[in-house]
Image (tube, rainbow, N blue to C red):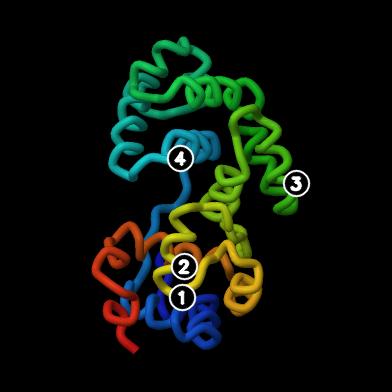
Amino acid sequence: MPTLTTETPEVAYLMERDWRLRHLIETVGDLRYEAPGSAFGHVAHAVIEQMLSIKAGRTIEGRLRGLCGGQITSEAILSLSLDEIRSCGVAARKAATLQELARTMPEPKLQALAELPDDEVRAALTAVRGVGKWTADMFLIFYLERPDVLPVEDGAVRQVFTWLYGAPLADGNVREVVCSLWRPYSSTAVRYLYRALNTGLVDLGPASDVLGG
């Protein structure tokens, strides 16, 4: 299982440049994450989980995986009707997106995106009806492991950013000052922001009290 530690070069770089992020990294500790599986399964996961809690997304995805025979593939999705996909709890629009994704972006085509620069990957994915920039950014960060992706529109990232820095990520001036410190490893910073939210750190109180320093 891949693990980020304070000795990982990109983590050490971020800790040296951003003291607030350093306190967050020290509080989170070693950050272990699962290596990505199939490309199609990864994008399907992002489509299903968007705008849902982690628990709800996993429940729905688990039902769909069972219906697909254990693995969500383009072939399995195309073998199901829209109503069958929806029976797992998938919203109608997301079910249609999964079918469109399966028709236009099967596994080999998604894997081939690894040869393209970030902007071209986004363009290819968002050309699929129902797939937005957030889903494309999740693919870039967590599947392709591109190093410098910042999903500015993501509500979760904005929430943790405001908690940690006391200023909105949506503010261009704030973003330029803070996030310039992260380049060229913004994706690693984002991983820690997500972990802070998913482990409940953000709910414990002000960042200054929770993280110290």
* The image quarter in which residue 70 lies: top left
Where is residue 193? Give x, y as percent: 43, 65
Q: Is residue 110 above or below residue 170?
A: above
Q: Which residue is mark 4?
A: 50
Alpha-carbon distance for marks 4 and 1?
25 Å
Q: Secondary structure at mark 4?
A: loop
Q: Which residue is mark 2?
A: 161
Label whose residue precedes the other's in the sequence (3 or 4): 4
Which corner quadrant holds the C terminus? bottom left
Q: Residue at x 62, y 20 (%)?
A: 103
Between label 3 and label 4, give the one nearer the viewer. Answer: 4
Categorize mark 1 by other alpha carbons within 10 Å: few (<14), some (14-19), many (20+): some
Between label 2 and label 3, give the one nearer the viewer. Answer: 2
Alpha-carbon distance for marks 2 and 3?
27 Å
Q: Secondary structure at mark 1?
A: helix
Q: Are marks 2 and 1 in contact (CB under 8 Å)?
A: yes
Question: Residue 120 shows which numbered tag?
Answer: 3
Label whose residue precedes the other's in the sequence (2 or 4): 4
